[in-house]
Image (tube, rainbow, N blue to C red):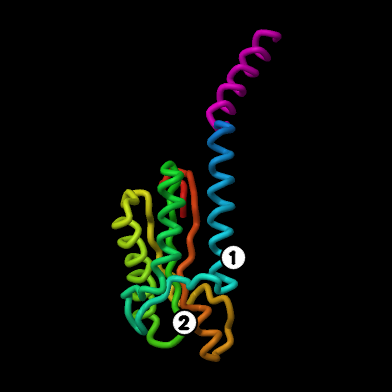
Amino acid sequence: MKLAVLIMTVVMFCACAGHRKDPLLMEENRRAALEMQSLQDLVTSRDIPPAEFKLGSDVLLPSSFDMLDRVAAILLRYPHLKLIVEGHTCDIGSDERNEQLSLQRAGSVKMYLVKKGIYPESIKVYGFSHARRVTTDITERARSLNRRVEFILTDRDWETVY
């Protein structure tokens, strides 16, 4: 009986040990998340412009470059991290066009980051059209809030994401 308990304890320890993260890696992930949150706060407060596109297009406006350069700098500082880029649109236009446009905009952001030295396989893009609106108001200001790109950092394998 004692041998069975000992074996079970060793098996459980080994199983759990595989899921433990290196404390240094955990601290790097925490710092990267704080940097990304700080950047998002700057965008929200409009201290720096968000990712913006030509109307009805996936062409990035030059006003977007500062923010995207900062995202690239974070990813270059923490190369073990992966980035999910989510594209969103307002409710103007057909559902099909908005789905396509949201994905294309996320793809444009990915291409910009790749040109800045980010490994392409470390970025996944998704388009959500207007399915995840931040507001349902139909004023132009509200619609502009819904037209956005969001970033999610992860250190997980892609097979375990989404």
Q: Which residue is mark 2?
A: 90
Left/right of residue 37 with respect to residue 52 in the rendered view: right
Q: In which image quadrant can residue 61 be found? A: bottom left
Q: Is residue 44 above or below residue 90?
A: above
**Residue drawn at (48%, 44%) of the image:** 155
Q: Which residue is mark 1?
A: 41
- How many discs appear? 2
Classify mark 2: residues with Cα within 10 Å, few (<14), some (14-19) or many (20+): many
SS state under label 1: helix
Q: Is residue 19 magenta?
A: yes
Q: Which three-letter amino acid code belongs to the residue tagged 1? A: Asp
Judging depth in this view, the residue of 90 and 119 nearest the camera is 119
Q: Which three-letter amino acid code belongs to the residue tagged 2? A: Cys
**Residue drawn at (48%, 65%) of the image:** 150
Spatial CA span between label 2 and label 1: 21 Å
Q: In which image quadrant can residue 133 be found? A: bottom right
Percent position of residue 70, x then y: 45, 58
Left/right of residue 70 with respect to residue 3 in the rendered view: left
**Residue drawn at (36%, 69%) of the image:** 103
* Image quadrant containing the N terminus: top right
SS state under label 2: loop
Image: magenta residue range: 1-21
Judging depth in this view, the residue of 84 and 73 nearest the camera is 73
Left/right of residue 27 with respect to residue 83 in the rendered view: right
Residue at the extreme bottom: 139
Q: Is residue 95 above or below residue 116?
A: below
**Residue drawn at (43%, 41%) of the image:** 80
Q: In which image quadrant can residue 68 be found? A: bottom left
Res 131 label: none
Percent position of residue 134, x then y: 57, 76
> Which is nearer the N-term, disc 2 or disc 1?
1
